[in-house]
Image: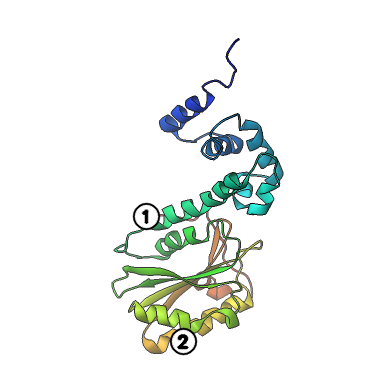
Amino acid sequence: MGKSVHTGHRSRMKEEFLARGVEGWPDHRVLEFALFFAIPQGDVNDLAHELIDRFGSLSGVLDASFDDLCKVKGVGAHTAVFLRMLPTVAQRYQSSRSRKDTIVSCQEDAIELLEPYFFGARNELVYILCLDGKDQILAIRRVAEGSIQAADVNLRRIAEEAFALRASKVYLAHNHVNCLAIPSQNDWMTTDVVRGALAPFGIELVDHFVFENGEVVSLADSEAHRGLEFLLVSGKNRHRR
């Protein structure tokens, strides 16, 4: 009996990955490769195609809920947990690359540090980036989950984190879910409230960022357009040092 065309397929893909990474691979092939490690035997190519067709893209698969993944024939609880785990591991990897002695010398440095914390987020999250007097990173802390409305931002939590770290400067950041990264009136109100609460204690609110699906808006940059239009910076086009 002749060998199946799939004989050695997994080994060949692993060798190709080690040699060149996934550069040039279509989404379904990247997903197929990932599924090797959740489903150790058998052909998972058809399953990869089915998942991409069902959820629209690789990111759609990885953002899908556990329950929705389990509805796909061939996806068990183990595989669903594995797929849900991938975005969180990538997020932790990106955030852990920043060292505590990193200097935040400009707006782009702060954006680069904060962006991974919103990767794959399904809810609105609020973070602060705290710096010392020399602009060195002290910590990045999640201070709220849910709406960014002023009433929902825990000013006491923000202040306690900043005081405990002896921060001199703070960047505030949150994400929008399923809408444009355009600041709302509540976002502006929150910026004003947080800035006013921290200023008497000598803590500067440097900027407030709104993230959404690869895009980010700086409220500091948008100040001149407040109430009119906002400066939208593409994640692909914005300058990086």
> In terms of depth relative to the viewer, which is nearer, 47 or 161?
47
| Residue at (61, 67) in percent of width and height | 182
Asked if the residue under mark 2 is in contact with the one under mark 1, i.e. CB atoms within 8 Å, the reply is no
The reply to whether residue 237 is visible in this rendering is no
Q: Please, which colouring scheme is shown? A: rainbow
The quadrant the C terminus occupies is: bottom left
Q: Quadrant of residue 99?
A: bottom left
Residue 25, percent across and down? 55, 34
**61 displayed left or right of 140:** right
Q: Amino acid at mark 2?
A: Ala
> In terms of depth relative to the viewer, which is nearer, 193 or 34?
34
Residue 118, percent across and down? 52, 61
Measured in 3D between alpha carbons, the distance from the residue under mark 1 to the one under mark 2, in whole angstroms, is: 31 Å
Residue 158, percent across and down? 45, 79
**211 displayed left or right of 180:** left
Q: Which residue is mark 2?
A: 197
Vertical comparison of 32 with 87: above or below: above
> In terms of depth relative to the viewer, which is nearer, 28 or 11?
11
Q: Amino acid at mark 1?
A: Arg
- Residue 97: assigned label: 1
**3 displayed left or right of 106:** right
